[in-house]
Amino acid sequence: MRGIVWLRRDLRLSDQPALTAACEACSEVIPLFVFDDPLLRSKTFGSVCVNFMLGCLEDLAASLAARGLPLQWRRGEPVEEVVTAAREWKVDVVYWNRDYEPAALLRDRAVQLQLAEQGVEVRTFKDHVVFEADEVCGITGEPMQRYSAYRARWWTKWQAVKPTLLPIPRGLCVEKAVPLPAPRPIPAARELGYEPLTPWIRAGEQHARKRLAWFVAEPIHAYVNSRNLPALDGSSKLSPHFRFGTLSPRTAIHMALASLATGGRVSRPDVLTWIDELVWREFFQQVLSAFPRVAGGPFRAIAVPPARESGPERDRFFQAWCDGQTGYPIVDAGMRQLNETGWMHNRVRMVVASFLIKDLRLDWQCGERYFMQRLVDADVAANNGNWQWCASTGTDAMRGYRIFNPALQSKKFDPDGAYIREYVRELDGAASKWIHEPHLMSPDEQVHARCRIGRDYPSPIIDHQQARREYLDLAKQQVKR
Ligand SMILES: Cc1cc2nc3c(=O)[nH]c(=O)nc-3n(C[C@H](O)[C@H](O)[C@H](O)COP(=O)(O)OP(=O)(O)OC[C@H]3O[C@@H](n4cnc5c(N)ncnc54)[C@H](O)[C@@H]3O)c2cc1C
């Protein structure tokens, strides 16, 4: 039997269900990746994300080549490309790991239908999550809307099932190779219409595993505190690897739990808190899978204040937010980190999102889109779920009262301003006392700090306390209606 393994967001060899199943059942295996031209043209994702994906593909192609199996790739409309490949290569079956994004579900259904017409079988597998939406659900099978309840059930399920890991398939070898023309090298970013960049987080399965090994050896055991401090390397920075599947969540969880048995300074609460973040990831995947409409709008049509109307002020606010020129150092540091590196610390993501929605009163979907275009880990489920959480329109909405005070967040989580100084370089000379609210410096202090507010660094574009009051008033009016 001849089979294609259609690789998508599972760019690795170990703990890879579709690849393992194909190697077990087929005498001939063709690993295939399709560059989705319409998606690439839409520029939904940015250069940093595309370059990361290309790095993962190069790593995967090298790992497969080392085992005598070339990674075939095609470029075009994915349904057409997969169906054509199956016909041209005369395959009996196509394998893939499931994807829960609404567009991906439609695409996969179309491929399945067309392959069925050609008499080609399709076999699909759970991979991207530990548990799919229908495995962790309410008593009557309904999808869960509260993270805390979901988390409790998720852990019960984990204890009951303890998913095992799949090794790199032994059958992944030259004997399975199909005599096809040798594939061309993986295209460069420029050929796909993107700027070439070297992502700051290194791509590929080997780097994912190295980073995970480093993280579970030590930093994970101090995660509860250090994860909130943006100046530290206190979180795993594995999000792009989970996004492109260079690491499976099962591997990460097993290794995290195994680290508790290594002796030395280990901490169970820290490890469990880190795994809970992966449960958040699964939670948002199941929300998207059960309620695909969230990808296009609010989960809940609750009474949140309307976004500011379009016009020059709205445009000025949005531009200042995107450029990191709001006059709020923690917000500006976050946005500049995003623009420069393609990544932003989680705590700061929450602060900048709250600032966009509650202080500037701009549509959360503008922020969601901007993040998708800039993040190396851009992921529909996690991005949408978190933006809706910040906008109070999501599954566990709090009606708009969750408003972050940027200066307080900054004082608490970046007390010396080390993070701010790294990205807002014009404030480098400011004393720690002023770094969070530099507009409060006297003219003499500004001279001493070599930073004139309004010239070298902007004055706040909005008054936080006033914006907060206005937002809450608007929220109350909405509730009364
Ligand atoms: C407004 C906003 C937008 C976001 N957009 C994305 C996005 O597009 N892609 C993305 O992967 N994450 C997103 N997040 C979640 C979170 O910020 C990142 O996953 C995290 O910062 C990645 O860093 P890390 O790998 O060091 O995380 P760690 O702290 O090491 O956590 C481990 C893993 O858990 C998952 N995780 C952690 N926090 C969350 C969370 N809040 N929601 C869902 N999964 C989580 C990630 O896969 C992460 O790699 C967003 C958060 C906010 C507030």
Image (spheres, grey):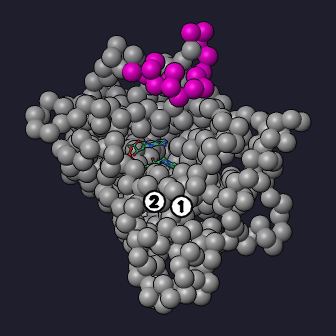
> In the image, is residue 92 part of the stretch drawn in magenta?
no
Residue at x 60%, y 35% (from the top left corner): 288
The secondary element bearing badge 2 is classed as helix
Taking the image as shown, residue 138 lies to the left or right of residue 292, namely left
Quadrant placement of the N terminus: top left
In the rendered image, residue 255, in percent from the top left (x then y), is placed at 23, 35
- What is the three-letter code of the residue carrying label 1? Ala
Write down the region rendered in magenta: 139-155
Task: Specify the farthest residue to the right.
Answer: 481
Q: Is residue 290 visible?
A: yes
In the rendered image, residue 49, in percent from the top left (x then y), is placed at 47, 59
Assess disc 2: are there few (<14), some (14-19) or many (≥20) residues with their C-alpha within 10 Å of its C-alpha. Answer: some
* Mark sitting on residue 411: 2
* Residue nearer the viewer, 264 or 185: 264
* Residue nearer the viewer, 154 or 416: 416
Residue at x 40%, y 50% (from the top left corner): 228
Assess disc 1: are there few (<14), some (14-19) or many (≥20) residues with their C-alpha within 10 Å of its C-alpha. Answer: some
Say if mark 1 contacts mark 2, CB within 8 Å. yes
Dividing the picture into quadrants, the one containing residue 41 is bottom right
The secondary element bearing badge 1 is classed as helix
Q: Identify residue for label 1.
A: 407
In the rendered image, residue 111, in percent from the top left (x then y), is placed at 59, 37
Residue at x 46%, y 18% (from the top left corner): 153
- What is the three-letter code of the residue carrying label 2? Lys
* Mark sitting on residue 42: none
> In the image, is residue 142 part of the stretch drawn in magenta?
yes
